[in-house]
Amino acid sequence: MSSKSLLENVIQQLELVGESLKLDRNIIEFLKHPKRTVEVSVPVKRDDGSISIFKGYRVQHTDARGPYKGGIRYHPDVTLDEIKALAMLMTWKCAVVDIPYGGAKGGVICDPYKMSTNEVERLTRRYTAMVSDIIGPFRDVPAPDINTGAREMAWIMDTYSQLHGYLIPEVVTGKPLTVGGSEGRLDATGKGIAICAKEALKVLGLEKTSVAIHGFGKVGSYAAYWMNKFGVKVIAISTHLGSAYDSGGINVELAMEMGVNSDARRIMNYPKGQVSKDPDVPLYVDADVLIPASMENVITSKKAERIKAKLIVEGANGPTTPEADKILEEKKIFVVPDILANAGGVTVSYLEWLQNLHREHWSLNEVSNKLEERMVTSFKDIYRFLLKNKNISMREAAMMVAVKRVASALKDLGVWP
Ligand code: GLU
């Protein structure tokens, strides 16, 4: 683990970028703090009749460019500082792909694997009710994140709608198709990562490549699936309980059919190659591309030393510590940063919100084309910025473009009163 928290890291990053951009100190100070932080104690009736209290958060970083946007995660390790950091990263992410949203994040400290479906539903509905005053279609639009998905989003939509007396699908994105979800939202983050990887491979002039994926959940599994479709061989995958390595190629579709992406334990049943209990195998194998798609702070300096990949495309939010980042730079590894690489999810969330507001349903083809166009354009914009500004990394380039966009909006809005 990094000695610093993710929040300290993102604030430090903002300070550095602010200096490089010669931004007004007041604006930097403004952006270091989330605009609103809400903490709720969510009472949930357990199946045995007892009541548990779960701590929940919703942090809204800035809405200078549009309504707050960001997922809600359920995890035992959630902390307020982590959610604050992730809310800030959402602001940069939306700005990098130039969609008119601000940044937010929510989280509940809980272990959904130790709860029944009914308990998770009661938790989701009560949490929604307790933050219902600060969310809304033009206020703050939640979405899935770690351990939440279409099912939870439907409950959020229904609870919010019941409280208002009519159906309001545009309050949340990542919903099931039956209640206003968008075609292509499920695999959007993974596909966006693969599109970025493809663009980066072109820039680096690499062909006939292989990839290792750390984290085979909602994001990593679809990143693997699309990398495969783009002709890149997947040689290692992992969950937090183990890994599978096969230099001849992992059968991604088989792993998905086996449910490795929804139940971390199933990795141990993968029938081919070498299976081990070490989840970090993908980090060190001889693959040209590495996609960290599990959690934050996974690539520490110690681990960075051992990475052999030439290209890292960050699927998770904040997977690389700043110290590790320096090492990767010294090793001349090309890193496509999280705020660009994993922005496919929020991009299709935006498309879903637009469809809901217009009461339309677009074809998969239309959504896919829009996603591809947005990801490729954003990658090229950031890469062009990097070429213009010698000696900066893709992360610095992406941050500089994002912070500049947000700072300009803040400046034009001014401080009231
Ligand atoms: N939780 C996802 C992320 O970190 C999606 C956010 C969204 O769609 O609003 O990007």
Image (cartoon, grey):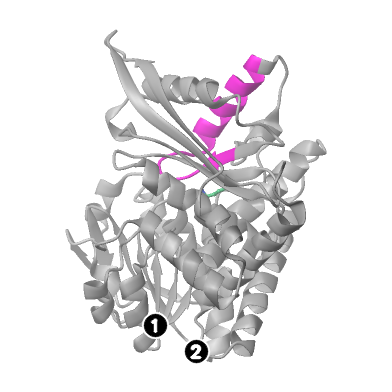
Callout 2 amino acid: Leu
Quadrant in which the N terminus appears: bottom left
Q: CA distance from mark 2 to mark 1?
A: 9 Å
Asked if labels 1 and 2 touch by Cβ distance under 8 angstroms, the answer is yes
Nearest the viewer among 351 and 395 is 395
Q: Residues within 10 Å of mark 2 (few under 14, many from 20)?
A: few
Instruction: Find numbered disc 1 in the image and state the secondary structure of the residue it sits on.
Output: loop
Q: Residue at x 60, y 45 (%)?
A: 69
Residue identifier under label 1: 288
Image location (x, y in percent) of residue 235: 34, 73
Instruction: Find numbered disc 2 in the image and state the secondary structure of the residue it sits on.
Output: loop
Q: Is residue 99 visible?
A: no
Image location (x, y in percent) of residue 285: 27, 77
Quadrant in which the C terminus appears: top right
Q: Is residue 224 left or right of residue 414?
A: left
Q: Which of the 4 quarters of the picture holds residue 355?
A: top right
Q: Which of the 4 quarters of the picture holds residue 4?
A: bottom left
User: Which region shows up in magenta?
Assistant: 142-163
Q: Earlier in the sequence, mark 2 or mark 1?
A: 2
Give the label on residue 145, or none. none
Nearest the viewer among 171 and 258 is 171
Q: Residue at x 77, y 47 (%)?
A: 362
- In the rendered image of this protein, does residue 391 appear above or below residue 54? below
Name the outermost residue toward the left.
Answer: 277
Name the outermost residue toward the front.
Answer: 417
Residue identifier under label 2: 206
Q: Is residue 22 magenta?
A: no
Q: Residue at x 56, y 91 (%)?
A: 390
Q: Number of marks in the image? A: 2
Magenta region, main secondary structure: helix
Nearest the viewer among 147 and 395 is 395
